[in-house]
Every structure is written in structure tokens, then in C-alpha cells.
Image: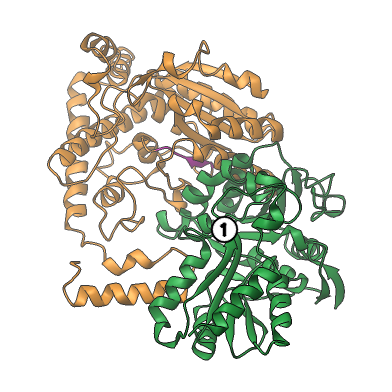
Amino acid sequence: MPDESTAPTPPAAEVPGELPRDRLLDAYRFMVLARTMDERCLTLQRQGRIGFYVPLQGQEAAQVGCALALAPSDWIFPAYRELAVALVRGISPKLLLDQFIGNSGDEMKGRQMPNHYGYRRFNYVTASSPVGTQITHAVGAAMAAQRRKDPIVTVCFFGDGTTSSNDFHAGLNFAGVFRTPTIFFCQNNRYAISLPLERQTHSPNLAVKATAYGFPGVVVDGMDVVSVHTAVAEARARALAGEGPTLIEAQVYRLGPHSTSDDPRRYRSDAELAEWKAKDPLARLKHDLLAQGLLEESADAGLWEAARAEVTKALAEAEATPPITPESIFDDVYASRPPALEEQRVECLRLLQEGILKP
Amino acid sequence: MTDLTLVQAVNRALHEALSTDPDVLILGEDVGVNGGVFRATEGLQKEFGSERVIDTPLSETGIVGAAVGMALYGLKPVAEIQFLDFIYPAFDQIVSEVAKFRYRSGGQYPCHVVIRTPYGGGIKGGLYHSQSSEAYFAHTAGLKVIVPSNPADAKGLLLTAIHDEDPVLFLEPKRIYRSVTGEVPDGDHRVPFGQAATVREGSDVSVFAYGAMLPQAVQAAEALSSEGVQAEVIDLRSLVPLDEKAVLASVEKTGRAVIVHEAPRFCGYGAELAALLAEKALYSLKAPVARVTGFDTPFPYALEHVYLPNAERIAHAVRTTARAS
């Protein structure tokens, strides 16, 4: 983390309903850190230093607003675009870069593509690539929390495309039936890779789908950190009061590509992009902070510089972290290795020793 | 010891687990008030309540996905899928999530879900109430696949599954749910995974089978005994992990192998056994390995007696294998 003056404060255990003015600057710092890290990761991928990357630009306010409204004991079930949520959660850039590189510091042990991470100690569950599968998990975990009488909520992140999936329907239906303390946080960024929202659904919006499952659906301006925070805090309070789940549709725009393998110029116009760039959530919050006297123009550059320095330091450390050992691919398939798998591990080690496989 | 049918033994295992571990719960379609369409969960909701024996909406994806979330949180869910034939909506959950959670999280998130489901033919169930698709799941790293063939094993293996650290697909041979009765130990009876059982010793041919094929294989072996052919019948019980040692030791003794399963032949579980014998027991073999399996067709309704391996067909294969040189 950078020095004390610029380090944003993670969310408190007691979550207030509205984002207080003094947390606005923290929100902005997290958004700046997320944007900075995101830009660096896109460069790293182009330079071949990481294999792949899923950017979040345009979705920072939605993610930070949501994450700041949660308690550390709440369980997060992310998709693969929630960098800012992870940062608010306290997962450090170094840990994340270890994962993107797949080195020996990667707690996923080099098994997953970049962006597919999770850390039990942060109540941030390991993501997978199939879209929507985490929705039913969030519901099941909420049922378990209900059973244990733990005062927590589970929060599930997904995009507009996922609302067409099998698991979206199954998960929301279960959540309605069992009135689980779950927040379904949909970041509607208007595209599922190339498919625009109007081809994803004929519904007037995505939040309206909650009606069919018997619980509230809320549309919120996802470019506005305060609105998002309020909506999530309200949903959380309802969930903790035993009033069941909420679907929140945060309307955002994916300013970048779906992933580093995507070229969005194939499916959307420059004019559309320019229109949304003008609504950049960072510019918007900065404007508000300046207007409220919470930030000086001169201090803004310092925030960006601090974020860049933090990411640079984390990257240097991550790149200096040794690679993962090849035989580790045989760990964690099961709690302990069955004989046939142990035999394959020994075979692999022998091939490595003989130079037939390279470490 | 109590005399029980196989389905009663399943019920007793669930009862034992619910009684002794507050983290165990059951979820599935019709498992609560109705006690399951095969009555495997009969009486459990009444005794343990609707929060531990949960009737769910009709969604296999939801059942397995919710069970995953419960397991991640630390509970021990036992999900019932009403028929193996209906498990495919949850295939993504099982293959992409259940099987991979421990691995993809670097060991942070074990996912000890048990999925119980009746499988197999012989009940006039046609295409969609008869399938044996164990090979899809045995092919997936991270899952354990268990198939009991008698009441005592059904209880012992299911209790092992519920308290195992890994996810288990527990396939129950519905055709013999009630046709076999046997002595079942009371209490917390457990049968370890990865250990095949020699059901009948013999010196001439090894017959490998599991689940509802076991009684057929034993019947075949007994019939052949009078012809002077002594077949050794091995109940695999645990498809993953496989008791390789038991398979190899038997074939090293007999030099001949017949593999029996209901599932279609092509890329069926028997193909893996045959490959294992080719790799590790080729020089012990005195005859080609034979497979007695379902045909490579969908499971037929009116002609299931033609499709399903039976004692006569197994005996024919064993006889041929015993005489081959």
C-alpha cells in the first residue's frame, strides 16, 4: 500500500446506509487504483508479460460503490471483471499480479487464467469462466448462512449476458423460494462480448426480471458511486432483516474490450464509445469531489502518482517471485492423491528429470 | 445387524448422518414430504425438519449449484437427482464447479458435495429413466464415482461419501433397490473408497462388474461352475478411485478378463479397464479381454431385455474367454 495519506480505508464492519462524504474520497482512490492497475495490465498483456486480461474500465463506480456497502464478513461471489471489488476487499495488487503471472505467490497455484481468483480469508470466492454458475453458489451459501444464523449476506456479481443463462433463472428462483439473504449485483455493461443488450433480452430492463421471482429489482445508475452504494446498502439491510434477496441492475458501460482477445470496433461505433466516455465514472466523481471541496485539483495528480507507484512496486515484486513448481499440477485435485494420480506425478517428474518435459 | 433392502440401507445411512452431524442436510426434488420417488428419504423430513431435508424447485442446476454454495460455506449437503438421466442440466455445475473448486482455488475451497442418484435399466424406464452415464463423470478429474451393489455397501459407502473431503457422485442401482436384501451393520458403518470386493473366488476367468450387474455376474459364475469353469467375480464398488491392485492381481491369477457394465461399450468404463490390462497385465493375459455391455444405442424401452447384459450373456462371454487360447 502507498503511504498513509493516500491509502484508502477498507469498509468498516458496521455499514451505514449512505456513503458518508468522508468516504467519497476513499471511493475515488479505489477507483483510481483500479483504473491504474487495469491500464497497466492491458499493457502487460500486450507485452506478453501476462497471458490474458479482462479489463473493467467504465465499471469502477458500480464495483466500488457496491463493495463499500458490504461488511468484510459478507461473502462475495465474483465473475471475472471485479478488480475494483477485490481491491476494496483488501486483496493487494501484489497478490492479484501474482495470480495474473501465475507464479509461486499465486494462491491459485498458477492454475487459472488471469482474473480468475479468490481468497477465502477475504470471503472472496474463486471465480470460474462459465458465466452464471456462481449465482446458484451464492444462493446455497446464503442458505447455509441462514442455517447457521450468521448475520451476513452473499453478493453475486455478473453481467447482462448472464441474465440469459440457466443458472440465473435457477439461482434467482431458489433465492425467491427460500428468501435468501442474497444480493444479485448485475453490471449491465450493455454488451456480452459482441451481443448488445437489445438482443440479450426483450425485457424493458434487467431488474424487472426479479418481479417474476417475487422479490425487488432495482435499476441504478452504475456510473454514480453514491447511488450504487445506497442501493446495495438498502438491499443488504433488507436481506439482514429476513426480507430476502434483491436484484440490482447497475447500468454501466464497458469502455474497453471484453478481454484482451476482443476487438470491440467490430460491433460498436466510435460515436457510441465517445458518448459513454463523456460519462466516465472517474471524471464524474472527481467533478463532484472538486465541487464539494473534498479534493483539490492539485492533489488529484498525487493520487494517480501514488496509485502508479503502488502498482509499479507490486509488479516488480510479483515479477521477482519465483515460478511455480511443475509437479504442483497434481496437488488439490483431491484432498489426497489417489494411487493412479501419484503414479502420473512420478511419471511427470521422471520426464522432467530426463529433460523430455521442460519445467 | 439388520436385514435391509438396498434402498432402506441408503435411508439408514442418511438417517445416521443427519443424526450425528448437524452440518449434513439433504436437498432435492420430492425428497421431503414425499420421501423421494423411490422412498430413499422416507421419514427423514418428519424427523429432521424441512430445513435439513429440503424440497427444492424443479431444477437440477439449482440443486447442485445450491449444494456447492452450502459446501463452500462448510455444510455437508447431500443432493438427490431424481434419475441419473436428469442430471445433465447440472452437468456444467458438476464438471465445471463441483469437480474443479478445490483445484482452481489452490486448495482453498474444498467442495464436498455428495450427489446421490438412481441409475441403470431393468425397470422399463425407456430412454430417460434407465441410463448409466458413469463414464462422463469418471472422466472428470476431481470427482469420485461410487456404485454399491448390495445393502451393506450402500450404507457403508454412502456414509464414507458424506464424510469424505471430496465430491462424490453416488450411483444407486435402482433395479436392485428392493430385489436384494442383506444384513447391514447398525450405526456409523463405513466402507472405504478405492477397494474392490472379491465376491466370488475363481481361478479361470476374472469378471469385473459393479452395481446392478453384480447379481447377474454372480449368477453367471454359479451356472458356469457346473461346467467346470471357475469365474472370479470382482465388485469394483469404487470406479474413481479404482482399486487397480485388485484388478491386476485377479488377472495375474486367472489370465482372462470379462468386463461387464450396462452402459454403452464405446468409451465406456470398461474401455479404461481394458486399457489398464493392456498396459499393466498384457503378459499375464491368455485370451483377449471381453466386454459385456449395453449396445451403442440409446436405451430402448420395449427391448430392454435385449439391450441389458444378463447372466446368460455374461456366461456366454466367460465361457468363450475361458476356452480361448
Q: Residue at x 59, y 74 (%)?
A: B317
Quick check: B30 left or right of B104?
Answer: right
Crowdedness near tag 1: few (<14), some (14–19) or many (≥20) residues, C-alpha within 10 Å: many
Q: Amino acid at mark 1?
A: Glu
Indicate whether residue A75 is drawn in magenta.
yes
How many marks can you see?
1
Q: Residue at x 21, y 12 (%)?
A: A270
Q: Residue at x 44, y 87 (%)?
A: B284
| Residue B55 percent across, percent down from the top left | 76, 42
The orange-coloured chain is labelled: A
In the rendered view, would you say A166 is above or below B123?
above
The green-coloured chain is labelled: B
- State whether residue B306 appears in this view: yes
| Way the structure is coloured | by chain
Q: Nearer the viewer, residue B262 or B295?
A: B295
> Which residues make up the magenta segment?
A74-79
- State whether residue A18 appears in this view: no
| Residue B19 percent across, percent down from the top left | 79, 63
Q: Nearer the viewer, residue A27 or B147?
A: B147
Q: In which quadrant of the rendered image does the N terminus of chain A lie?
A: top left
Report the chain holding disc 1: B
Quick check: B133 left or right of A285?
Answer: right
Indicate whether residue B191 is drawn in magenta.
no
> Which quadrant of the structure image shows residue B151?
bottom right
Label 1, on which residue? B134
